[in-house]
Amino acid sequence: MDTYDLITRNAEEVVTEEEVRELADDPDGKRVYVGYEPSGVLHLGHLLTANKLIDLQEAGMEVVVLLADVHAYLNGKGTFEEIRETAEQMKAQFIAYGLEEDNTEFVYGSEFQLDEEYTLDLQELQVSTTLNRAQRAMAEIAGNETAKVSHVVYPLMQTLDIEYLDLDLAVGGLDQRKVHMLAREELPELGYDVRPALHTPIVADLTSGEGKMSSSEGVTISMEDSTEELEEKVNSAFCPPTRDPEDDLENPVLELFEYHVFPRFEEIVVERPEKYGGDLTYEEYETLAEDLESGELHPADAKSTLATYLDELIEPGREKLREIRD
Ligand code: IYR
């Protein structure tokens, strides 16, 4: 695959294409990052951006994972002690999932965000950014709870992280886009360079195909799920064989194949008894989606195959969690 295609595959938004093309021309040693608020165990939301980081490592880039402890604290996720303990577990799960250990720099936000220079820059940003702008940037991240002062400081710090971690590219889910847009506007005001951003899609809720899959509401799949729990969740997923052009519903089963399974496996085998036509093998997501639509692939077979592959993907992280907790 061409480097630009590898860097941008499955991205919902590339800001800007021209800037990312320039990176793709000379990717070696370029620094990219995703920041995560440590909370709970890894779920599919985290793994979607982790898949992108694995693509970027394959493209020759240096990956930085920000364990955003100060951000989690500002967003009400617990005490520093609790947050750090979760962060250490997250780090172990990311490595188990497939981020190359020698090629991934894990950084705690508190390692640099409390330094004097950073703090002074933060204060400058607080002077130059309107309350309204910071609140809007934060709306998708904190939901309806943007009423605390900490919630408007948060996106300004995320803006500075891009400079202070010396990054060439910022990666995040689409819910981070307004923060990245704020960063593109504000960094030059402080005399720093604008950096490109890549945004991964938001996967729809598993049981309804509406809205987004979320760990706080509805069903999500995490590294805590047993094989049986995972099978049960996938089996009850919404999976209409054909799409009704009248509605906006997504097919979450197809989305999980596209964003989670195909990027990590060379080929997908759907096991079927001979009397139902025997095994099907797919190298590309599109062929599987077409077969589901045409009826060649039954939703029940698609689901059981999805569960098998997701189980394989989360097994090393599940094992790691077991080790840590025992
Ligand atoms: N806002 C992210 C966490 C986060 C991301 C980056 I990129 C940072 O520089 C800091 C924090 C979230 O919603 O999880």
Image (cartoon, grey):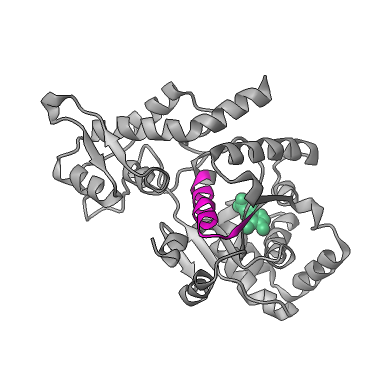
Where is residue 310, by image quadrant?
A: top left
Pick whichever, 323 or 75, lies toward us: 323
Where is residue 326, by image quadrant?
A: top right
**Where is 189 relative to 118, above or below?**
below
Task: Left or right? Give the position of 65 relative to 247.
Answer: right
Task: Left or right? Give the position of 149 relative to 54.
Answer: right
For the N terminus, which image quadrant? bottom left
Residue 38, image x, y percentages: 67, 43
**Is 97 a magenta residue?**
no
Residue range corresponding to the magenta coloring? 47-63
Which secondary structure is most common in the magenta stretch?
helix
**Is 58 a magenta residue?**
yes
**Where is 86 relative to 133, above or below?**
above
Pick whichever, 85 or 76, lies toward us: 85
The quadrant of the rendered image in which ligand 1 is seen is bottom right
Residue 249, image x, y percentages: 31, 49
User: Residue at horizontal 54%, vertical 45%?
Assistant: 46
